[in-house]
Every structure is written in C-alpha cells, then in structure tokens.
Image (cartoon, grey):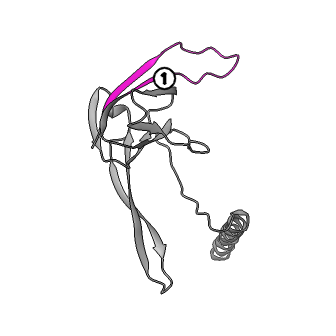
Amino acid sequence: MKKTLLTILGILVAVVVVLVGTALFIMPKGEMVVPYVASTTPQVTVATKTSSIKKTKTGTVTPTKTVYETVISQKNDNSTISVRRGTRVIMQLGTFDWVVTVSDPSVLSRAQVFQNPVGVEGFYDAHKAGTVVVRGTGKPKCESGKACVNTISTFKTTVIVR
C-alpha cells in the first residue's frame, strides 16, 4: 500500500514538472501568465489598487504608476458607481452574449484587448471626469440547431468618473 502511494505521488510530481517545464518553454520571454477565473455568480464592485514596477540600474524596484480596477456586474444594475480617472472597468455581466454601449466614449471607452477572458464582456478605461450611462443587452448563448429560449436581459448603470 505504502509503495503504491509513493509510486502515485512520484507520477504526479513528474506530471507537474513536465507541465511547468512545457509552459516555461512555450511562453515568450518577458511575458507573464495571469490566471483569470470567470465566475457565473455576480460580483460585487471592487476597486483594487496595483502598481507596475520599474527596476533601476542599482537593482532597486520602484513603482511607476498606480492602476485601479473596478468590476461591474449584475449587482450594479440600476445603480450609480464612482471611479477615478485612469481606472480600468471590467464588465462581467454573466452568461449571456452581451452588447454593451457607453453614452460618452470620451469619458469611458472600451479598451483594445486581444481577447476577453470567458465571462468578461469587455474592459473599459476611464479617461476624464464626467458621468456616463452604461447599458447592456444580453441574449442567451444558443447552439446552432437546438431549441433556445428567446429571452432578452437588460442592464443599466451610471458611472461617475472623478
């Protein structure tokens, strides 16, 4: 029994080493993998503060810029939230296919990203002080050739950028 458990543990360790080694081999230098877990449950609006860092010639690390992020979810429907200029707003509205519009893109506009993670409708950047209305219309994701409920969900929130 003990020998079998040690053999299984050895195999698991070997698999992990191979997976990590493969990931390091195929990942381009200088890039970092940031895991993202999409949630099907609505998220509360959360503002987080992170800093990018800069390494100096002496080897010390200094922050270069502060980045704020706020998640907008179904819990923010028909509400008003306030964010700082420079905040990255993450729209996470749920499992439907959403079309999101912003009343004034000069205040809050969609960020250009290669691909949204699963469960995220888009990333938006707060550029200048102002008030915008964010509206969304969501339809169920339907597989081709299968019956689908024809339901439309709507979302609206006001964002004040200060």
Q: Quadrant of the N terminus?
A: bottom right
Task: From the top left corner, tell me how far across and down residue 9 is, in percent.
Answer: 64, 71
Residue at 73% x, 68% y: name it: 25
Residue at 41% x, 20% y: name it: 154
Question: Which contiguous range is marked in magenta?
Answer: 134-158
Amino acid identity at mark 1: Gly
| Residue 48 is inside the magenta segment | no
In the image, residue 117 above or below residue 26: above
Q: Nearer the viewer, residue 132 or 155?
A: 132
The part of the image, by quadrant, that contains residue 136 is top left
Q: Quadrant of the C terminus?
A: top left
Residue 33 in the figure: left or right of residue 81: right
- How many marks can you see? 1
| Residue 138 is inside the magenta segment | yes
The part of the image, by quadrant, that contains residue 67 is bottom left
- Under circle 1, the secondary element is strand
Residue 82 in the figure: left or right of residue 13: left
Residue 90 in the figure: left or right of residue 159: right
Give the residue pinned by disc 1: 138
